[in-house]
Image: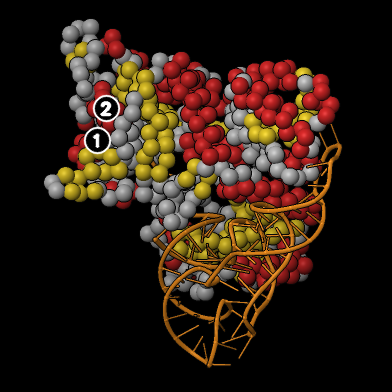
Amino acid sequence: MGPVIEHGFYYDIDAPEPISDADLPEIEKIMREILKRDLPLRRYELPREEAIRRYEGVDPYKVELIQDIPEGEPISFYEQEGFTDLCRGPHVPKTGMIPPHFKLTHVAGAYFKGDASRPQMQRVYGVAFRSREELKDYLWRLEEAKKRDHRRLGRELELFLIDPMVGKGLVLWLPKGNIIREELIRFMREEQQKRGYQLVTTPHIGSLELYKTSGHYPYYAESQFPPMELEDEAYLLKPMNCPHHVRIYAAKKRSYRELPLRLAEFGTVYRFEQSGELHGLTRVRGFTQDDAHIFCTPEQVKDEFKKVIELTLFVFDTLGLKDFRARIGTRDPNSNKYVGDDAHWALAERQIQEAASEMGLDYTVEEGDAAFYGPKLDFVVRDALGREWQLGTIQVDYNLPERFDITYTGPDGAPHRPVMIHRAPFGSIERFLGILIEHFAGEFPLWLAPVQVAIVPITDRHHEYAEKVGGALSAAGLRAEVDRRPERMQAKIRDWEKQKVPVILVVGDREAEENTVAVRDRRKKARYTAPLEAVVADLAERVRGRRLE
RNA sequence: GCCGGCGUAGCUCAGCGGUAGAGCAACCGCCUCGUAAGCGGUAGGUCGCCGGUUCGAAUCCGGCCGCCGGCUCCA
C-alpha cells in the first residue's frame, strides 16, 4: 500500500525478504516493462463484507484498512493483468500513459499505520516527473542541497565536531563555530535586555525531588539520562530549565507589581534522544536553549505572548529567515497525557490563537501537538533536504505554577496564581545554528562570519603593510587574519574563498604606497580599491548593524 | 529503539582472497608572483573493533561500535 507524497511516492510491502537498495534497479526495470506493455487498468467497487472476505486470512493489513474506510465511502479496487490492489485511486486508464521519467530513490522500514508496536513493512520511495529534464533537474538540485548540509559544512569550515569518543549527540564547538555561537547569544542577550528580561544562571543538575514536583519525573524517565544516586541523594542532569526558574520565583514573596517577571538563561539541557534520531546539530543529546520563563497574571498572558512573537519575528528577520511556518499545538481531547483542568486549556488555546492572529501570523492548528502542560506556538523551518525542524517555541503553562504552588500578592492583598510562559526564540542554539549554516550555505553575513576579513599580501615584502591593515581592522573590533603563508596570491584567495570569508583585502606595492586596500567582497560580488580608513569604517558599520548584505 | 545501507591516511576516494595506493590537506625547501590551485621533497594507515573461515583476510562470514536514509519518538 502507499500514497503520493510531496516529492514523489512510496509503497509499503510486507516482504518475506528485506528489500535493499541493490534491488531497486531490477524493480525499476520491471516497472518500465509494465509501462511499455501499456496494460489497461480496471476499477471496480465491492461491498464491505465481500471486500473483507477477499483478504481474510490472506492479507490482514488490507482487512484492517478496509475496516477503517468510513461507512458510505466506496471501497475501490484496481486490477491490472491479474494483479488487484485496494486503492482509493484515481489511476491512469493504461500504464503506457505514465511518463517513464521516474527513479526509485531509497528503501526504509516503516511501521504499519505509523505505530511502532505494529509490524514493520519495507517501504520503497521514488520520484516521478513528466519529463526527463525535470527528473535530471530534481536529482541535480538534490546534489546541490547536499553541499549545504550543515554536517558537511561544519567539517569543511571547522565549525563543530561530534566525536563518538566524547559521546554521540554531544557537540564539540570548534573555535570558528564557537564565534558564531557566541555572536548569536550576544545578539539574543541584547534584544532580551531591551525587552525587559533578566538573566539568571542555574546548575546543570537538579535533585530528583525537583523533577518529581514538576512532574517531569518519572513521566519522561525514558528520555532522560538516569538519576545519579549517591548516599541518600539523587540528581538528574537537567532536561529542562523550567523548574529551576520556578524556584527562583518562589524564593521570596512576589507582588503583582513585579509581574511580568521575565527570567532568561542560556541553559544547557541533556535529553536521552533515541540513537536512531540523532542528526548532526539538529537532534542532539546535549543542547543550549535560549530559554526564558515569563511569570505573569492571567490578564497579561496575551500581551506577553505577542511580545514574544515580536521578538521571534525580529530574530528571524535579522537573519533573513523568511521560509518558516507557524504551528499552534493544541491538546488531543481523546488523550490522557495532558495535565491541568479543561478551563485553563481552553483559555490558553484561545489566548495563543488571538495573539498569533493579532500579530498577523499565518498558522496551522495541529491537535495533539501541545506540551503535556499546555498549548504552544512553534516556528518550523525546513533544512536543505526539505526536512522540517521546530525552532522557536512559545508555550502557555497553568500547570507548573500549580504544582509548585507559587503565588503573587494582588492589589487586593490576597494570593493569586501566576501563569508561566515558556519561550525560546531559537529553540536550541545547536539546532538553530545547524539550520542557519544550511540557510546561508556557510556564507554567513559579516557580523557572524568567524573570519570577517582575510588580508592577502602579494609578496613577502608586503607583510609589513598587511599587518598594519590587520591591526587597523582588529582595533575596530573586526576579526581579521593576515595570510603570511609562502603561497601565491591566487592560491591564498582560493583558500579564503573556499572558507567563505566575506571580505578579502589584497595589498601590494600600490596599496602600501597609497594607504589603500584592494577589496574583494563576496556578498557584493564587487572589487574596488579604497582608502584603508574608509574600508574599516564601512565594515565596522556593517557589523554593528548586523546587516545581512 | 526498529528496517536497510555504509565504515581504507585529517578530507575525497581507488583497491574487493596473495600482505596498502592516489589527489587534496599537513610538514620541509625553492619561487616573490596583481584577484580561485607555482615547483620539488618528507611524513602519515593495527584497512572501525572483536571473533570465525582460509596456507593466507582490507577483501568472505558473524557479533559489536559508529555514521547515513527512513520509521517511531521529540517535555
State the mark number for residue A214: 1
SS for tag 1?
Answer: helix
Q: Quadrant of the C terminus of chain A?
A: top right
Is the residue under label 2 in contact with that under label 1 (CB below 8 Å)?
Answer: yes
Amino acid on which the number 2 mark rests in the picture: Val
Lateral position of residue A190 relative to residue B20, left or right: left
Q: Quadrant of residue A437?
A: top right
- The front one of A136 and A312 is A312
Q: Nearer the viewer, mark 1 or mark 2?
A: 2
- The front one of B55 and A204 is B55
**Residue appearing at x 24%, y 48% in the figure:** A227
Marked residue nearer the N-terminal end (1 or 2): 1
- The front one of A456 and A75 is A456
Q: Chain of mark 1?
A: A
State the mark number for residue A246: 2
A494 vs A397: above or below: below
- The front one of A486 and A178 is A486
Lateral position of residue A109 relative to residue A39, left or right: left
A228 vs A66: above or below: above
Lateral position of residue A127 relative to residue A436, left or right: right
Amino acid on which the number 1 mark rests in the picture: Ser
**Residue appearing at x 33%, y 28% in the figure:** A201
Residue A393 image offset from top left, x and y in percent: 44, 31
